[in-house]
Image (spheres, rainbow, N blue to C red):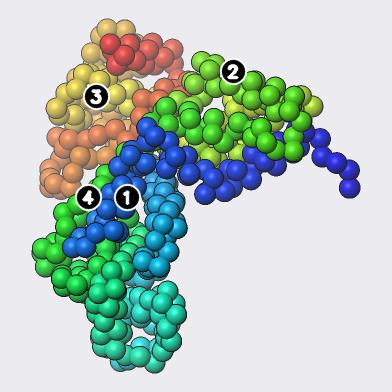
Amino acid sequence: MGRLNPAEQAKIILRSRISSPSFVFSFFSQSPDSNYSGVFIPLIREYAENVGLNLVIVSFSVSTEVGNPVSILRYVLEIVLEELLKEHPDMISVIRLNGLLHCDNNCALKVELPILPPCCYTDCMNILEIARQLCLEHHLMFSKMASYDDNSQFLLSMLRECGLAHKTIVFVLDEFDLFTQGKQRLLYSLLDAMQSITSQAVVVGVSCRLDADQLLEKRVRSRFSHRKLLFLPPSREDLQRLVEHILLLPTDSSLPNDYTAAFNSKLLNILADEKFKGIIDTLCYSDSSAGHLLRFLFSAICHMDMNSGFLSVENFKSALPSIQRQPKLEALKDCSVLELYILVCMKRLEVKELELCNFNSIMKEYKSIHDTFQTSDYYARNVCLRAFEHLLDRALISFEDNKGHGQSAEFRPVKLLISWHELHQGLKSHRSCPLSHAVLTSKCASVAVA
């Protein structure tokens, strides 16, 4: 097999980096300006190294369009725990539970448990899993035949003994909000057991729900430390530095030094290009998660020209359409001209920041557009109402709340479910869109910018 040329080697290095979560997310813990390193690491260290702290909830603030928003926290938490385990190898034990697995009664039925009411199977399985991991961490014999009471007593004993030995147990509850379903016996049992003076343990709940702490029952909330860490999605500057962190070739690799220097120089020029910044802004408009950015970078690397051996702005531009999710743009293509008018009216009302937007206010805006631009597309009120109801059925708009079911649809407040960017792109690509729509949207955009 022949030796790979530098371009092929560079492609392999970049792909392996993107596919390595430890490499990608180490950026957030290493960056001195990142709130992950400046806030998250010291606080988790404080919780793990001090006595008397019980539950901390780590939440990630995201829009509802993001697919897996908590992935950054999950990997950064692993990096933090890995650092703590290196510093205190014999003083910290980590027990991991996932709400997707350990809150399902069907999973609980797959292990040998005593005959109990169905609502108790999940709690039995959770205690069983905790006991199994504790035995594994401390090199003890684990019995599958132990009863629920035996495992509960074992947990209490382990918490007490670890506290006396100044050892910390860290319980990581991934998808924490799922553990709040039902009677919350597991959370209550853990937090209640940790109320002891000798106990030295912490429960770290990871969730993408901002109201995760409000889902706790009163008896559980009374034992909650009321410490909640909220992290925003990465900023544009963070994402820019992350791209640089991933795509800059290492100078100590087997690649020729001349090729590495030329590749990195061209890449830095691309990152400074306004066209590239515009591509990143478009990519992150609806989804600014790191996972979405990684999929985009992987696609861009696949488009790299092997003849030149370097990345170009065109590679990133070609990768953008393949990675963007556009389900609403497809729905806009099938909308009638009248339905497009209604969407434009709602967007104009949104820009004007009106407190109430319903069918009647939309019709007033529709008439205002017709009088101002003298359009030929003017329809009767009953026809507009049918188009309005059709948009509701297609989930391009929705009612503000579930109240007023007995009220006529004409008077109920509604909201737009598509962004300005999606509406603008949909109007540009619509085959039946009249010129007046483009004029109206440009007017709307100028108001929004102002």
Q: Nearer the viewer, residue 331 or 135?
A: 135
C-alpha gap between disc 2 and disc 1: 36 Å
- Residue at figure coordinates x 89%, y 47% from the top left: 1
Q: Which residue is mark 2?
A: 269
Q: Is residue 397 above or below residue 168?
A: above
Q: Amino acid at mark 4?
A: Lys
Assess whether mark 3 and mark 2 are in contact (beta carbons under 8 angstroms).
no
Q: Nearer the viewer, residue 379 or 276?
A: 276
Q: Which residue is mark 4?
A: 228
- Residue at figure coordinates x 32%, y 11% from the top left: 446
Q: Which residue is mark 1?
A: 208
Q: Amino acid at mark 2?
A: Asn
- In this rendering, which labeled residue sits more in front, label 3 or label 4? 4
- Give the mark, 3 or 1, whose residue is nearer the N terminus: 1
Question: Is residue 12 at all visible to an observer of this figure?
Answer: yes
Q: Which residue is mark 3?
A: 350
Specify few, some or many for label 3: CA neighbours under 10 Å numbering under 14, 14-19, or 20 or more.
some
Assess whether mark 4 and mark 1 are in contact (beta carbons under 8 angstroms).
no
Q: Amino acid at mark 3?
A: Glu
- Residue at figure coordinates x 19%, y 55% from the top left: 213
Q: Amino acid at mark 1?
A: Cys
- Give the mark, 2 or 1, whose residue is nearer the N terminus: 1
Question: What secondary structure is marked by label 3?
Answer: helix
Q: Is residue 366 left or right of residue 112?
A: left
